[in-house]
Image (spheres, grey):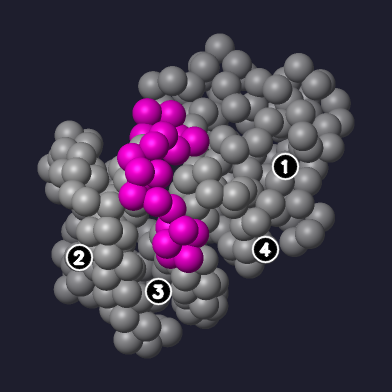
């Protein structure tokens, strides 16, 4: 079965920009209520302080501005030119400054990214991008990825905001792309390759379902299949929370092999 890709179409990417701007404003408002001491406290993301999460989001915004320029200039690009080591070092450096500066940089970088993206005509969101780790995609995928990070990390900050507060437009618009990323999660070092099975993810809210099957390190995804061990049904937010590691499969409507349902996140770890 051929793999599926779910990059937002150019008109969908433009629509997601509105959701991204609202989500960014909401995150900025939450951060404005965090005390200076609170920035140094742990987030819900294991091993990360709030300052580190916010610094990471600022760094990503800067990277997306650069990647957008590369794509429009028909150059290959990379979010972290120096690899994962550079990513970690940049987060630590950006988080060491006073909390006020961390917040100011986040707001500044988010504003710059929004201004760059708002100047693009709709047709350019279909521009091809080649990223070292993610491969080939359309430029519009960057909007979906940024919106995902903003919503997910807002929930990670322990500021009275959780998955139930995610924008419905985010969940509905980005869910197909998140399902399409499952083969990458299956190739992670911490994926349990012993767990093999077939799952059907059903979202009646957007009238979509995906058939997912694993064989060793390989994953096949399609719109329908001949059989499935387990059916996992939920709203777009429910399924996004599952795929992003923020909700247990047990919190969905499960039909079929319940043990296999619980193994889903062992087969596809992480966000």
Q: Position of residue 190 (x, y in %)?
A: 44, 20
Structural crowding at the residue carrying mark 4, measured as other residues with C-alpha within 10 Å and reported as few (<14), some (14–19) or many (≥20) = some
Which disc number belongs to residue 35?
none
Q: Give yes or no for residue 33 being in the magenta stretch.
A: yes
Label 1 to label 2: alpha-carbon separation: 35 Å
Residues tagged 1 and 4 counted as in contact (Cβ below 8 A): no
Q: Which of marks 1 and 2 is nearer the N terminus?
A: 2
Structural crowding at the residue carrying mark 3, measured as other residues with C-alpha within 10 Å and reported as few (<14), some (14–19) or many (≥20) = some
**Based on the displayed image, in which of its 4 quarters is residue 122 positioned?**
bottom left
Label 1 to label 4: alpha-carbon separation: 18 Å
Residue depicted at x 57% and y 24%: 267
Q: Name the residue under label 3.
A: 126
Label 3 to label 1: alpha-carbon separation: 28 Å
Which disc number belongs to residue 201?
1
Taking 263 as reference, is 110 above or below it?
Answer: below
Residue closer to the observer: 104 or 181: 104
Which disc number belongs to residue 168?
4
Q: Is residue 239 found left or right of 87 in the rendered image?
A: right
Residue depicted at x 76% and y 29%: 250
Of labels 1 and 4, the one closer to you = 4
Magenta region, residue range: 28-48
Which disc number belongs to residue 66?
2
Residue depicted at x 56% and y 58%: 174
Structural crowding at the residue carrying mark 1, measured as other residues with C-alpha within 10 Å and reported as few (<14), some (14–19) or many (≥20) = some
Taking 80 as reference, is 213 above or below it?
Answer: above
Residue closer to the observer: 231 or 32: 32
Label 4 to label 3: alpha-carbon separation: 24 Å
* SS category of the residue bearing label 2: helix
């Amino acid at each position: 079965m051929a793999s599926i890709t779910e990059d937002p179409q150019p008109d969908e990417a433009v629509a997601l920009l509105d959701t991204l701007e609202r989500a960014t404003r909401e995150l900025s408002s939450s951060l404005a209520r965090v005390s200076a001491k609170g920035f140094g406290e742990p987030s819900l993301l294991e091993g990360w302080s709030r300052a580190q999460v916010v610094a990471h989001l600022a760094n990503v915004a800067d990277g997306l501005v650069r990647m957008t320029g590369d794509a429009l200039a028909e150059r290959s690009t990379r979010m972290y030119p120096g690899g994962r080591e550079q990513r970690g070092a940049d987060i630590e450096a950006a988080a060491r400054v006073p909390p006020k500066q961390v917040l100011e940089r986040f707001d500044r970088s988010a504003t710059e990214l929004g201004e760059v993206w708002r100047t693009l005509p709709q047709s350019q969101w279909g521009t091809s991008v080649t990223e070292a780790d993610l491969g080939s995609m359309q430029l519009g995928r960057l909007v979906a990825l940024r919106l995902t990070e903003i919503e997910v990390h807002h929930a990670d900050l322990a500021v009275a905001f959780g998955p139930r507060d995610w924008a419905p437009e985010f969940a509905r618009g980005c869910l197909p792309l998140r399902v399409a990323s499952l083969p990458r999660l299956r190739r992670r070092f911490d994926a349990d390759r012993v767990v093999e099975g077939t799952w059907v993810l059903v979202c009646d809210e957007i009238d979509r379902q995906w058939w997912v099957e694993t064989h060793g390190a390989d994953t096949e995804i399609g719109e329908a299949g001949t059989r499935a061990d387990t059916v996992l049904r939920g709203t777009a937010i429910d399924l996004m929370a599952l795929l992003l590691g923020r909700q247990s499969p047990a919190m969905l409507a499960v039909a079929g092999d319940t043990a296999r349902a619980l193994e889903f996140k062992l087969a596809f770890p992480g966000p």
